[in-house]
């Protein structure tokens, strides 16, 4: 928290000094459409000197400015140490009830680095379950579930803080709507996270994404020119490095045209909790557990057994075989008789 | 009765998310009424009717829809009470980035969509900057990184608002938005209440129907660009 006293101090600093202490403070002025104050002028004096007509045009009230400034500095503060999420050791989902009111009798605790699969027919409540986690339900959603963080009910203010979002979502039908190069795009994201060494982080993300994608792209490739697989690879690399959300939800990664096993490992390596709605045999067996949904509730929780896992080798061989055929098709080759 | 103003740029998803929130509230037995303001025409009336809510449309024609809104808002409130609503939502036209229908002491919601681009939050005036709740829509069609940057940019211009992501198509987040709407304070009447921000002065000859271009025809509140 930025106290009133600290805020008054910040506001009385000359702008040059303020920017030295908090380089991102300049964004406060530009985001409101104001010019950066002169170096020697304090924020307080600057507010007092602003032309009334200019404020009217911008839709701002002079007396609201210092409050806005405090809130902005608090936001910066939170984002900086916002990696509070890093101290998430566990997330517990306390069972509620299904659509018929039958109790779900479980407490499910998940930890960073775990992979959880979600299976079940359409309408069975998979999306609702994810929404419960995202909203940090406290018995106040249709399922009656509650979510605990590190074993305790989270502070209600967490629900709406952008730096404390629990779930990052990597969905199938995502597009880039910005006309930027890959490098500019990742840089922009890193800036909004107030990362210290932006160029290094950006380069690392691009390299990681290139590792995951079949076809290579450069930092100068426009994001809108990326293929579906390349976009997903970029988002997986970006999310694993820049997102502060401890949980990453991925759906339909199977058709993404990327090395899906490595994609999941990338996230696990970065201590994410990976939730996947998938019926892909390889991904499902990679999971530590599968949550089976029926009628709006979790009907069973299956721990992936050694026996099940043993099949993975076979499935991977089959998958590799299909992959070879896919590549052959892509290269215009004929498919001979396969065993 | 609780009153809520929902504003936001055209097609940002105001109706879509309001419907999802209403659906959740209706399941809990809350009676909702809606008034939609627009300038020329609106399809929203029938969309709301389908959801089974009492709905009224106000078309401002050649008046600024936001000014028209202020002149009629007290009557809207009376209408909502007469219909026996527990909660009345007023959806504005959201045609200009400088106007806002938000009223002091009345829950103010702004709906803005991810597709509009990360520079949009900066460009929207009091409608966004003075809202209590900012609903961000269309997250389903942009990347996670863009969603994060977008909500950060919204936070930059309105650090105090409650920001919530709602998908206007699937309804994800609609239940949660409903809960926020229920927190709105009771608004027994509006006489003497203040708008959160003055509406732009629109009193030049062109407001009054002038069509001819040229300095001889410009009268009243005229403002000139500075080319120096
Ligand atoms: N993909 C997607 N589409 C959405 C979402 N929310 C709304 N839409 C679509 O966006 C379009 C506009 O939504 P409306 O709810 O009519 O927008 P509005 O703000 O009420 O529009 P006006 O009242 O005409 O200003 C519709 O086609 C919606 O289906 C969303 O979260 N995702
Ligand atoms: N326990 C529950 N009690 C009441 N309603 C529920 C419950 N679980 C889910 N629902 C509701 O059932 C509907 C369908 O659920 P949901 O959208 O989560 O299904 P899904 O498994 O994601 O389906 P799909 O595979 O088609 O995406 C939703 O409206 C959801 O809010
Ligand atoms: Mg679903
Ligand atoms: Mg509408
Ligand atoms: Zn206007
Ligand atoms: Zn005019």
Image (cartoon, coloured by chain):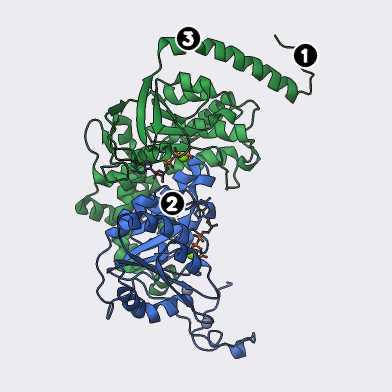
**Residue B110 is drawn in which quadrant?**
bottom left
Left or right: A18 as drawn, with respect to A176: left
Q: Position of residue B142 (x, y in %)?
A: 53, 45
The reply to whether discs 1 and 3 touch (Cβ–Cβ < 8 Å) is no
Task: Please identify the residue farthest to the bottom as the structure is shown.
Answer: B216
For the residues tagged 1 and 2, is the chain the same?
no
The residue tagged with tag 3: helix, strand or loop?
helix
Which label sits in the foreground, 1 or 2? 1
Look at the image and tell me in which quarter the N terminus of chain B lies: bottom left
**Mark 1 or 3, nearer chain start:** 3
Disc 1 secondary structure class? loop
Question: Which chain is tinted blue?
Answer: B
Mark 2–mark 3 CB contact (< 8 Å): no
> Residue at 60% of width from left, 32% of height from top?
A230
For disc 1, the marked residue is A336
Residue ID for mark 2: B153
- In the figure, the shade used to draw chain A is green
Residue at image position (63%, 42%) is A224
* Quarter assignment of residue A156: top left
> Which is more toward the observer, A243 or A258?
A258
On the same chain: label 1 and label 3? yes
Please rate how many residues cluster around mark 3, counting C-alpha atoms within 10 Å: few if below 14, some from 14 to 19, many from 20.
few
Q: Are marks 2 and 3 on the same chain?
A: no
Which image quarter holds the C terminus of chain B? Answer: bottom right
Query: On the picture, is A282 further left or further right than A147?
Result: right
Q: Residue at x 61, y 32 (%)?
A: A229
Spatial CA distance of label 2 from label 3 is 48 Å
What crowding class fits label 1: few (fewer than 14 Cα within 10 Å), some (14-19), or many (20 or more)?
A: few
Residue at numbered disc 3: A310
Chain of the residue displaying label 1: A
């Amino acid at each position: 928290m930025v106290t009133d006293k600290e805020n008054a101090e910040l506001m009385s600093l000359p702008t040059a000094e303020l920017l030295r202490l908090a380089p991102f403070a300049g964004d406060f002025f530009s985001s409101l459409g104001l010019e950066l104050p002169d170096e020697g002028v304090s924020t307080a004096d600057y507010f007092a000197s602003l032309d009334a007509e200019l404020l009217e045009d911008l839709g701002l009230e002079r007396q609201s400015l210092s409050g806005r400034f405090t809130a902005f500095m608090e936001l910066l503060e939170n984002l900086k140490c916002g990696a509070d999420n890093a101290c998430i050791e566990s997330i517990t989902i306390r069972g509620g009830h299904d659509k018929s009111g039958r109790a779900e009798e479980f407490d499910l605790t998940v930890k960073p680095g775990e992979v959880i699969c979600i299976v079940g027919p359409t309408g069975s409540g998979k999306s609702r379950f994810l929404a419960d986690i995202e909203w940090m339900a406290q018995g106040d959603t249709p399922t009656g579930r509650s979510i605990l963080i590190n074993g305790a009910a989270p502070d209600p203010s967490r629900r709406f803080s952008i730096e404390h979002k629990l779930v990052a979502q990597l969905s199938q039908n995502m597009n880039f709507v910005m006309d930027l190069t890959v490098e500019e795009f990742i840089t922009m994201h890193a800036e909004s996270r107030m990362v210290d060494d932006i160029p290094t982080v950006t380069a690392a993300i691009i390299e990681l994404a290139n590792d995951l994608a079949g076809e290579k792209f450069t930092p100068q490739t426009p994001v809108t020119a990326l293929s579906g697989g390349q976009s997903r690879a970029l988002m997986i690399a970006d999310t694993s490095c820049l997102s502060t959300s401890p949980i990453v939800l991925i759906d339909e990664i199977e058709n993404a045209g990327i090395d899906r096993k490595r994609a999941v490992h990338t996230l696990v390596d970065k201590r994410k909790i990976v939730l996947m709605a998938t019926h892909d045999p390889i991904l499902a067996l990679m999971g530590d557990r599968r949550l089976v949904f029926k009628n709006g509730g979790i009907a069973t929780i299956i721990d992936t057994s050694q026996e099940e896992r043993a099949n993975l080798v076979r499935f991977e061989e089959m998958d590799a075989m299909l992959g070879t055929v896919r590549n052959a098709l892509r290269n215009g080759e004929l498919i001979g008789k396969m065993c | 009765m609780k009153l809520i103003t929902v504003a936001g740029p055209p097609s940002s998803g105001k109706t879509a998310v309001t419907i999802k929130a209403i659906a959740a509230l209706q399941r809990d037995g809350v009676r909702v009424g809606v008034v939609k303001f627009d300038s020329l025409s609106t399809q929203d009336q029938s969309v709301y009717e389908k959801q089974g809510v009492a709905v009224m449309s106000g078309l401002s024609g050649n008046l600024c829809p936001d000014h028209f809104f202020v002149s009629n808002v007290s009557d809207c409130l009376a209408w909502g009470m007469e219909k026996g609503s527990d909660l009345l939502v007023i959806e504005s036209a959201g045609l200009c980035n400088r106007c806002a229908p938000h009223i002091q002491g009345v829950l103010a919601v702004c709906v803005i969509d991810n597709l509009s681009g990360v520079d949009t939050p900066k460009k929207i005036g009091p409608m966004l900057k003075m809202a209590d709740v900012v609903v961000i829509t269309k997250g389903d069609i942009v990347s996670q990184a863009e969603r994060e940057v977008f909500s950060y940019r919204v936070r930059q211009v309105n650090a105090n608002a409650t920001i919530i992501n709602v998908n206007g198509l699937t309804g994800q987040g609609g239940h949660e938005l409903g809960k926020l709407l229920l927190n709105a304070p009771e608004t027994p009447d509006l006489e003497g209440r203040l708008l959160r921000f003055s509406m732009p002065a629109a009193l030049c000859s062109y407001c009054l129907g002038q069509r001819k271009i040229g300095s001889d025809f410009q009268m009243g509140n005229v403002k000139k660009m500075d080319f120096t």
